[in-house]
Image (spheres, rainbow, N blue to C red):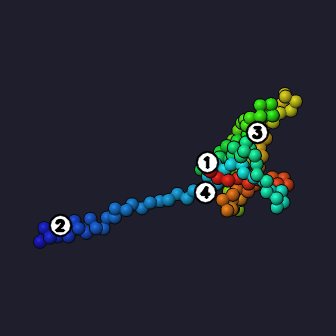
Amino acid sequence: MIKKLAIYLFFFLTLSCSADKDIIEESVDPIIGKWFFHSYNIGTKETLYDECKQKGYFQFTKNGGGDHVTYWVNRETNKCSLDQSKKIQWYVEDEQYNIKVFSQGSYGGILSFGITYLYQGTISEGILRMPVGYETINFIKN
C-alpha cells in the first residue's frame, strides 16, 4: 500500500511540475537602437539626405542615454568625415519622445559653456520624426 502511494505521489509530482518555466518578457521601448538620418520634410515635400549625412544617427539605450553622431563632407578633401559626437538623454512623456542633446559652446574662444538642445519626436510606420524649426527630420532604424 505504501509502495502504491509512493508511486502515485511520484507521478503526481512529476506531472504537476512543468518543464516550461515562466518567461518574463521585458518590454523594450521601440526607440531603443540606432536611428539613422534618412530624409527631411518641408511641408509635404520629402528630400533624402546625401549618403554622408545618412551615416549620422541617434543611438538610444535602455537606460535613457545614448549618442548623437553627425557626419559632413569636407570640402577640401571631398570626403565624408565625422562632424560631432554628443551624449544624449531621452524619456517618454504623453507618447512623445523628449531627447536632450548636450553640446559645448564658447564665446570669443575664451568663455566655454554647456548647451542643451531639446528635441521632441514620435515614431510611426517605422520612422522617428522630429520637427525642427520649419522642417521635420526623418530617421530610420537599423
Mark pair 4, 3: CA separation:
30 Å
Q: The residue under label 4 is which amino acid type?
A: Asp
Quick one: label 3 or label 1, which is nearer the N terminus?
1
The numbered disc on residue 61 is: 1
Residue corresponding to mark 3: 72
Closer to us: 71 or 118:
71
105 relative to 100, above or below: above
Q: Residue 140 appears at what percent x and percent y?
A: 67, 53
Give yes or no for contact between labels 4 and 1 (Cβ–Cβ under 8 Å).
Answer: no
How far from the left and from the top, in percent, is residue 2?
A: 13, 69
Q: Which residue is mark 2?
A: 6
| Mark 3 or 2, closer to the camera | 3
In this rendering, the label closer to the viewer, 4 or 3: 3
- Residue 107 in percent (x, y) is at 86, 32
Circle 4 Cα neighbour tier, 10 Å, few/some/many (<14 / 14–19 / ≥20): few
Q: Secondary structure at mark 1?
A: loop
Dot placed on the residue nearer the N-terminal end, 1 or 2: 2
Circle 4 sits on which residue? 29
Say whether marks 4 and 2 touch (CB < 8 Å): no
Give the alpha-carbon distance from disc 3 to disc 2, as whole Å.
76 Å
Residue 141 in sight: yes
Q: CA distance from mark 4 to mark 2?
A: 50 Å
Residues tagged 3 and 1 counted as in contact (Cβ below 8 A): no
User: Badge 2, how many Cα within 10 Å: few under 14, some, many 20+?
Assistant: few
